Image (cartoon, rainbow, N blue to C red):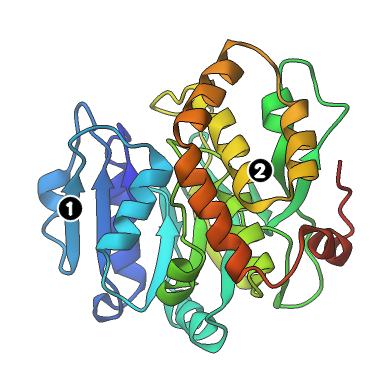
Amino acid sequence: MPFLNEGDEPLCTVRSLYETAPSSLFEVVAIDDRSTSPKGIDELCQYPNLRYIRNKKRMGVDASRQKGIDASETAYVLIIDAHMRFKNDGWMERFVECMEREPETAWCTTCVGLGYGSMDMGSPKGKYYGADMLFVDKDSKPNRPAREVLEPKWAQKQPGVEYEIPCILGANYGFSRAWLEHIKGLHGLKMWGTSEPFLSLKTWMAGGKCKIRTDIEIGHKFRETAPYRTNISALLYNKIFLCQTILPEPISNALIGYLPKDNNFNLAMNEISSDACVIENSRSYYKQIFERSIEEYCGRFSIDLP
């Protein structure tokens, strides 16, 4: 559970977690990404099986998530944000059963939209069921092209309690530790952005699946603005990193070609150049473990490639 300048929300999230699931079933790794005025830390640290780690420098959401994954010691991992709420309905036991049964699946749950003045799970703003994948939206607004390449979009609910989806979404992701290690988790991403496509595409291409359990509902506070800033160049870096490590060169080049060619793009490409060895090593590893192609993925989910 990473957090940065989120007031008492991390404490509220942890309190909700411990009120709805047996503490003997889990541990919490809380990663403070250098909050300037953290609140409720003393009380947070009183919970059993909770480790509080404060970063020496800001790493960003995705690197902090990976740090928490590396620090945890359980066979299964639940990745959450620090502004979540849970139901007292045996959700954790059911979620663990999913991961035990299909350890090569990336799982997510129904995302219950909260916030804007209410954190009541009984009165959500909406419910969301995983995501479709949008590789590129050629009709996107001119001021949003960076956000309309490699973007998950909320999917419509399908029949059934459990079914396959193109992409996880909602900050409610369950994995077996062995599978995260196999696909190298979030390694390589900077700050924040593109983590869901990165994890989902790697899972599917490595021979796994992405699935949702619609009967497990986890509340997620939707905010009008985040309490921290992420540079656009970091968002672009992650998209380019994904393209250059897991996609074939023609598709990679086509997607990168849709990104705006401005100063942020130039900054991102400079970092990409600096990380050329990391990218090449990652690309070589993924070629070894991938069992399916991106074309097969798009055919399975009726997705258009550029």
Q: Residues within 10 Å of mark 2 (few under 14, many from 20)?
A: many
Q: Can you give x and y, in whole percent of width and height, for residue 243 in the image?
A: 66, 43
Q: Nearer the viewer, residue 127 or 292?
A: 292
> What residue is rendered at 13% in x and 51% in y?
43
Left or right of 51? Residue 259 is: right
Q: Amino acid at mark 2?
A: Cys
Q: Nearer the viewer, residue 56 or 40?
A: 56
Q: Can you give x and y, in whole percent of width and height, for residue 195 in the image?
A: 54, 48
Q: Amino acid at mark 1?
A: Tyr
> What residue is rendered at 19% in x and 62% in y?
50
The residue beneath circle 1 is: 52
**Residue 110 appears in the picture as rendered:** no
Query: Which image quadrant for residue 16?
Result: bottom left
**Residue 236 appears in the picture as rendered:** yes
The residue beneath circle 2 is: 243
Q: Nearer the viewer, residue 157 or 58?
A: 58
